[in-house]
Image (spheres, coloured by chain):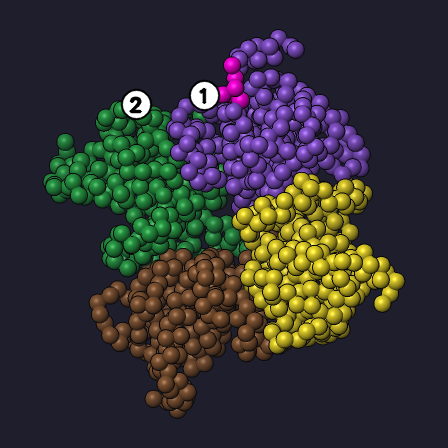
Chain colours: A green, B purple, C yellow, D brown
């Protein structure tokens, strides 16, 4: 276990309550992303295990909109289930394992078939930030082309090699597209990652419309992005991600937002 | 009765339970396609009779979103109702009968006014696969032009000649468009055919957006399609079509997904 | 009273039940058009009085989605309420009165701000039929420009002169657009007129998408339209308008479709 | 206190009932704008205090779709909470305070991330009125560019200087856009301002579609706009804003429209 990992483990000591909270958030995140139209019956959401940074939490193979706490399983850094109880597991879990391996700063990973985002993965038009809420896209959004690393395939990230290649394309950015497939979105905590996935979709819709209007488009400047992201760094009740999260939660699971206050 | 047909009949021997399951799936398929916006008050869904491959099961003339088990009737290969009880029947049932006649590999047929698909039927832009979930479109999507076979008509497939001409246009492919009308989608079982109809619509929306973004588009390669379709061939709980079906079912008939597990 | 009118009155003799049925259908039509997104809080729907063709039935000034049987009032051919009980009435009722005056064949009139239709009223692109369900548009869709008859106005059809000018633009067609405002849709009975309003909107969406795809568009041929409309002439249970009406009704007023069978 | 202000205060004498009514309308306005898709989890709505025109009423920092009467707080003309009880407050409240300061005619202010409007803020295509219901846009819709007054920032209106600059860009108009961010909509009372925000969004969708159809577009003439707006000046039961408000209210808060009649 690396030094960084031990520190993280110590930090989350006595973490049974924290673990339960992550499980609950993971379920909420699945339901919210479905309710907001970012995932359909496909797509998956994971969180790094707060008790052990060498592991991550992910539902058994199930539609995100149906995920429940008892569906959450634990996986290791090679994508292996820690307790294999025979339940079906996502064949593309290597997206998650390889990103967690490569990115110590990442605590949550989302893979989706975000519908307005996909057209940007099959054209030469880069997905760029036009709206404040998606300012993190100013870092650039690379497109992962499986053919470059594995030739003709079913394009699914079903082994560690493919996952590693995707993680390399992602680099230190928050979002990468998979050509003709979807995207992967990462972040420092689950709520912020969910917000990034949703606003990546929202921004894609807006950018498409801007392209349709024609003429030059004013994008969010990298310096503006830096300042916007800085002000989003902290989680404060009633502000930023917390505010929208309560709304999304109330939509996805009516009555649930009450419970979380 | 052909050899292939006898084999199929034998395979489904003692098929009363299997027959009931197909009826239930047919009702679910109707409701799901309505809920997902692929059919509106028009459109129809059929399945080959598991007890007799020379017959197929189809609702009486009714909006798909209202279809119930008692609405399902049995039809023969000439589109004739096996027990004519005076209930109204779909005038375009010949789409189904002629496709079943021509395609021994087909176990389900869907006709819809799939809204995002129709614009591709009245322009010269071919509907092509851009997304993994619609990789079956890489086989090519022909457009049926009634004028070429029957001159000026009401464009409805209301007799065997028109149905046969449509089946010929379809050939061995999974999808054909009817100009200014809709599409016909076929498949090896009902769930997969429903998924094909839904993802044909989803892919059409994505392709339109890609066209609007402008520039060259990267389509799913035929070889990629072959590999993707191969991995979809089997029905495994929690994977592929089973996973999305549970979600669609829960949306269309809340609580029903529970029953099917 | 003209000869035609007397015949109509005789035909609807003993028409108290028929009158009640029209009131019920008018309420359903209002609710359906709102539920389908053709009208928003504005727009209005009327039917010719089955007891007296010189009169028509129209809600008091109220959002269509809230209309109830007790809201329906009776109006004369000059747009005057037969029993003025002080309730607010639609200022644009002259759309209805003047169309009924000019068109003996019309039994229902709908005015809406049909959202996908309006862009066609402010551009030079004619709204033409691309889909079977909107084949009636093959008759041509004129655009009413208030400036040509009344100069600079608030563009509302608030008097008989403006209503007459609109009716003249409509001519013997089923649909006319009002520039930067909406449309007027007419028909031989209420259900068919509601279906026309809905499919005018649906066809507008499809045509916009076809334009966006680019290149030549294949429209419904006038001869095809004639044959399609001919087959729609009769109201048969389970077919044509009856089938979609049951679906729309179930969506707008859950449980109501049961009552009408 | 200015003369105009005193008059307003006197006018609203004995205003406890009036105050309660404004609070209720403010809550309804928040819910309606969320339900209509003009605001998402972000955005805020305020009303000038009927008891004191130097103050305005605004929710604590909370998603508009969740706002309740007890969330409404009072703020002064420098954006300061009158009773700071430690609850989180909107960091962009200076949009409201500076507009109220600059515009004695304004009684309500809405800030939103109106999705179809934002593309017009990042392109050179001006948002212009094509539909009667948005005729107020004929006054012109300026775009506020924060860079011109404050250089590279997080683009949020988090102080009085930024608010003042925005108010200057707005001038005497009803709507201004914030580049890559959203819009600010103002009006003489809350209901009319809510209607303006909704129809600004609706008009943006229509204009985008008109641009996509191609060719010259016929906009609402300024003289037409003047006449349309004149007829909207009065609030009459069943007409104009009152009619659509009842519908929006019923959608956002089922049963609530009954209570307000």
Residue drawn at x 22%, y 70% is D85
Picture coordinates of residue C159 (x, y %)?
Answer: 71, 74
Q: How many marks?
A: 2
Q: Callout 2: helix, strand or loop? A: loop
Asked if the stretch drawn in magenta spans residue D112, the answer is no
Name the dominant secondary structure of the magenta segment: helix
Residue drawn at x 79%, y 58% is C13
Query: Within the image, what quadrant is residue B65 found in?
Result: top right
Residue D173: mark in rendering: none
Which quarter of the figure is the N terminus of chain D placed in?
A: bottom left
Q: Is residue C204 above or below residue A119?
A: below
Task: Answer whether residue C209 is visible to the viewer in this image.
Answer: no
Q: Is residue B212 above or below residue D221?
A: above
Picture coordinates of residue D70 (x, y %)?
Answer: 30, 67
Asked if the stretch drawn in magenta spans residue B17, the answer is yes
Residue tagged 1: B234
Picture coordinates of residue C204 (x, y %)?
Answer: 65, 51
Query: Within the image, what quadrant is residue A9 found in?
Result: top left
| Residue at the limit of the structure toward the right, as seen here | C3
Residue drawn at x 31%, y 74% is D74
Q: Is residue A4 above or below residue D157?
A: above
Where does the magenta region start and end? Answer: B14-19
From the viewer's perspective, tell me whether residue A91 is left or right of residue B151.
left
Q: Is residue D253 above or below residue D166?
A: above
| Residue at the limit of the structure toward the top, as seen here | B3
Subunit bearing disc 1: B
Subunit bearing disc 2: A
Closer to the camera, D159 or C21? C21
Residue A86: mark in rendering: 2
| Residue at the limit of the structure toward the bottom, as seen here | D3
């Amino acid at each position: 276990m690396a030094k960084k990992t031990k520190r993280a483990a110590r930090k989350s000591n006595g973490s049974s309550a924290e673990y339960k909270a992550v499980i609950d958030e993971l379920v909420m995140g699945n339901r919210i992303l479905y309710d907001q139209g970012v995932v359909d019956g496909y797509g998956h959401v994971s969180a790094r295990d707060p008790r052990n940074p060498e592991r991550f939490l992910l539902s058994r193979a199930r539609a995100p909109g149906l995920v429940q706490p008892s569906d959450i399983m634990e996986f290791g850094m090679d994508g292996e289930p820690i307790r294999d109880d025979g339940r079906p597991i996502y064949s593309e879990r290597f997206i998650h394992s390889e990103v967690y391996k490569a990115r110590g700063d990442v605590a949550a990973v989302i893979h989706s078939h975000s519908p307005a985002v996909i057209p940007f993965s099959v054209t030469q038009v880069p997905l760029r930030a036009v709206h404040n809420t998606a300012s993190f896209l100013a870092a650039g959004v690379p497109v992962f082309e499986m053919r470059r690393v594995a030739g003709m395939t079913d394009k699914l990230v079903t082994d560690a090699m493919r996952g590693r290649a995707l993680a390399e394309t992602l680099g230190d950015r928050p979002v990468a597209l998979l050509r003709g497939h979807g995207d992967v979105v990462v972040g420092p905590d689950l709520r912020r990652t969910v917000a990034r996935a949703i606003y990546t979709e929202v921004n894609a819709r807006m950018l498409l419309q801007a392209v349709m209007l024609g003429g030059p488009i004013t994008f969010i400047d990298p310096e503006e992005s830096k300042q916007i992201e800085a002000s989003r760094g902290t989680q404060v009740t009633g502000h930023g991600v917390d505010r929208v999260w309560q709304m999304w939660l109330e939509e996805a699971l009516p009555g649930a937002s009450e419970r979380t206050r």
